[in-house]
Image (spheres, rainbow, N blue to C red):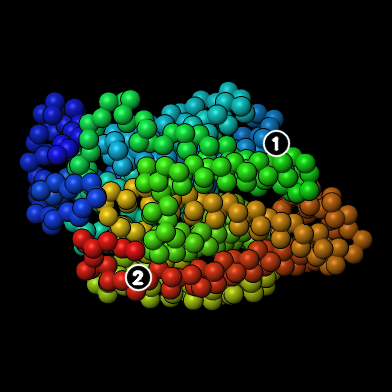
Amino acid sequence: MATQDSDPMTNSSEGEKGLESSSTTEKNGSTQEGTLPFTAEREYVKGIKLILVLASATLATFLMMLDMTIIATAIPRITNQFHSVTDVGWYGSAYSLTSASLQPLTGKLYTHISSKRVYLGFFAFFELGSLLCALAINSRMLIIGRAIAGIGAAGLTNGALTILSACIPKQQLPVMFGIVLGLSQLGLALGPILGGTLTEYVSWRWCFWINLPFGGVVAIILVLIHIPDQIIKDKLPLRKLLPKLDLLGFGIFLPSAIMFLLALQFGGNQFSWSSPTVIGLFVGGGVTFIIFLGWEWRIGDEAMIPFSILRKKIMWASCVVRFFYMGDIMVVSYYLPIYFQTVKEVSPVRSGYYCLPVILVQMIFAVGVSGAVSKVGYVVPFMVACGVVMSIGDGLYTRLGPSTSTATWIGYQIVSGCGNGLGTTIPIIAIQSLLPAEEQSIAMAILIFCQNFGGSVFLICAQAIFDNKLHKLIAEYVPGADVSAVISAGATGWRNILSEQQVSGILRAYAGSIGGTFWLALGTSIGTLLFASGMGWVDIRKNEDEPVE
């Protein structure tokens, strides 16, 4: 029988020994044939030790989400210093390319190597990337730093959930997931506010420096505290470990993902959608992905993305639901601030404050629903409710215009936040509750990849809708205006080239164009609703040791 992989720092640290005394163990049921063995005594974490682990996981995930949006309001200052307007797209895409491409591999790493070590490794990359960005002397160095930070970010969400699953009894996990993910998502809302404040009063570099002291606290806590693994992991030499990671499969998947994401990045921006470059990237990505699927099928359960897991109803349904759900979240998160900045004509920092209602309501509902689902036992009612309420909220967003009152747009955000919060943790809870422990890290990696991919795809679609409608509506509402000049002037710079009589028409054009993106968001929320019932009517309270088909 395999022995559990222990951390050398755990055995050598006196402080660690003291903290370990607060750990408790619980009896675990019999294991099933064909799965990795569980310990006879299942070790959990309690007391101050649990609080510290929970706080560290929340803070690390918060920093990752903060890093996704904090740079938005700093970009103008960065481009002024580095004279790098043409590099703006890479400040975000360098991060997302590495993060999304590495995501499936994280599942294998967390399955076969100590979760604590892997998590600290990814967190070290995230901190290193932040350091390089803070010290950047030119645009290229900043882009490299963002790419390295993206490598680290790839394993943080999956790692946090894997660690919590090992530290906390199964029946308490839904509430803990709700707390971690709910609080972490504050980072998305606070990013533009904090980024604008730091850029204006200190320096844009502090958008990255801020990750280092807080990250240091997280690292120290996790190094000192013993964290058990979900499953017993063999201590394998490198030559035996590498084949289990399916590095060949990853080597095929990586260029496929990069080509497809680059095609989405380039299409309609640097190149037209019909250009040989974009078409070539799509074709190359598609062909490479087919080869990847063939390889994964050939090696079976050793694959990075095993078909045996994908075939399970709860798995594929959760992935599709998350694909549409995150598409909705990203489209609204991106275009709601643009509405406030262009149509309501407020600063980027103030637009961040104006978006707080949806984030705060989502956080509250995420925590509450996570507790409720552990009592009810069924995930489908909550996911269906999520799709319904999100659809209502997105439908209301399509009504936003220049004359929309403050009370009205706050009300719309409250409805939207309720819908978002209803579905924040449901697919995660379903996978963690209904799949065997040895499959959960891989399943979570696949789920997170699908949600990131969905966000990227629908943001590109939203951008295309926005651009097309804006060209059309400016020509319609402001006859005689130079459409290209107005758009080139930027979302707020157009005031410098137009007369006061033309302002109302431009505001209507921007409102209508943004409304078009909210119609797309409505489509994604309907997609969420349509696939929600596919997650199955299985009681998560009664399936701790039963296989899921």
Residue 453 position within the rendered picture, expressed as x and y whole percent measured from the top left: 54, 51
The furthest residue to the top: 137
Q: How many marks?
A: 2
Tell me if 3 is positioned left or right of 133 in this view: left
Picture disc at residue 304: none
Mark 1–mark 2 contact, CB under 8 Å?
A: no
- Mark 1 lies on residue: 85
Residue 225 position within the rendered picture, expressed as x and y whole percent measured from the top left: 19, 38
Q: Residue at x 34, y 44 (%)?
A: 159
Q: What is the quadrant of the N terminus in the image?
A: top left
* Residue 261 seen from this side: no
Q: Residue at x 43, y 70 (%)?
A: 534
In the image, is residue 14 above or below residue 186? above
Residue type, mark 1 in image: Val
In the image, is residue 448 above or below residue 304? below
Mark 2, other Cα within 10 Å: few <14 / some 14–19 / many ≥20: many
Residue 275 position within the rendered picture, expressed as x and y whole percent measured from the top left: 79, 44
Q: Quadrant of residue 81?
A: top right
Q: Earlier in the sequence, mark 1 or mark 2?
A: 1
Mark 1, other Cα within 10 Å: few <14 / some 14–19 / many ≥20: few
- Mark 2 lies on residue: 379
Q: Residue at x 81, y 53 (%)?
A: 486
Tell me if 520 is positioned left or right of 17 in this view: right
Residue 210 position within the rendered picture, expressed as x and y whole percent measured from the top left: 42, 37
Q: How far apart are the two marked residues, 1 and 2, measured between alpha carbons?
A: 46 Å
